[in-house]
Amino acid sequence: MPPSIDSSLPLDLRDRLALERTRLANERTLLAYVRSALTLILAGFSLMQFFRDHVYVWVGALLVPVGVGVGVAGWLRYRSKSARIREHIAAS
């Protein structure tokens, strides 16, 4: 048995703490998606603003919708995982 698992804790408490860790991990993952989406969007606008070569403008114009897509995908993933966590809590 790994030393980090305390076998003296009741199973209920361990399960509740595990669910809380899972919920917090889901929120951290959402924040990582948001951070990545904002980075892509800002990089796209920066390329379009500061470089006048057509290649950079097209790459910048491509990065903006990709960033929006990453943000939407992260939000949808967060909602899906949150619903599964809530279902698991309701079932137990």
Image (cartoon, helix red, strand yellow):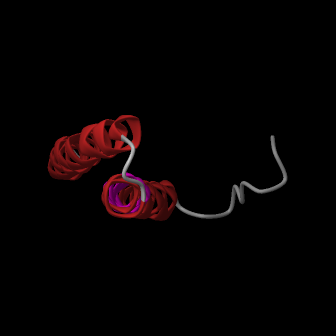
Whether residue 33 sits left or right of residue 66 in the image: it is right
Range of residues picked out in magenta = 30-42
> Can residue 23 be seen at all in this image of the molecule?
yes
Looking at the image, which residue is at 72% across and 60% down?
6
Q: Is residue 88 magenta?
A: no
Q: Is residue 37 magenta?
A: yes
Whether residue 22 sits left or right of residue 70 in the image: it is right
Nearest the viewer among 32 and 70 is 70
Looking at the image, which residue is at 52% across and 59% down?
14
Looking at the image, which residue is at 39% across and 43% down?
53
Nearest the viewer among 21 and 44 is 44
> Can residue 16 be seen at all in this image of the molecule?
no
Nearest the viewer among 57 and 80 is 57
Q: Position of residue 83 (x, y in %)?
A: 15, 47
Q: Residue 50's image quarter?
A: bottom left
Q: Position of residue 72 (x, y in %)?
A: 17, 46
Residue at the right extreme of this rendering: 3
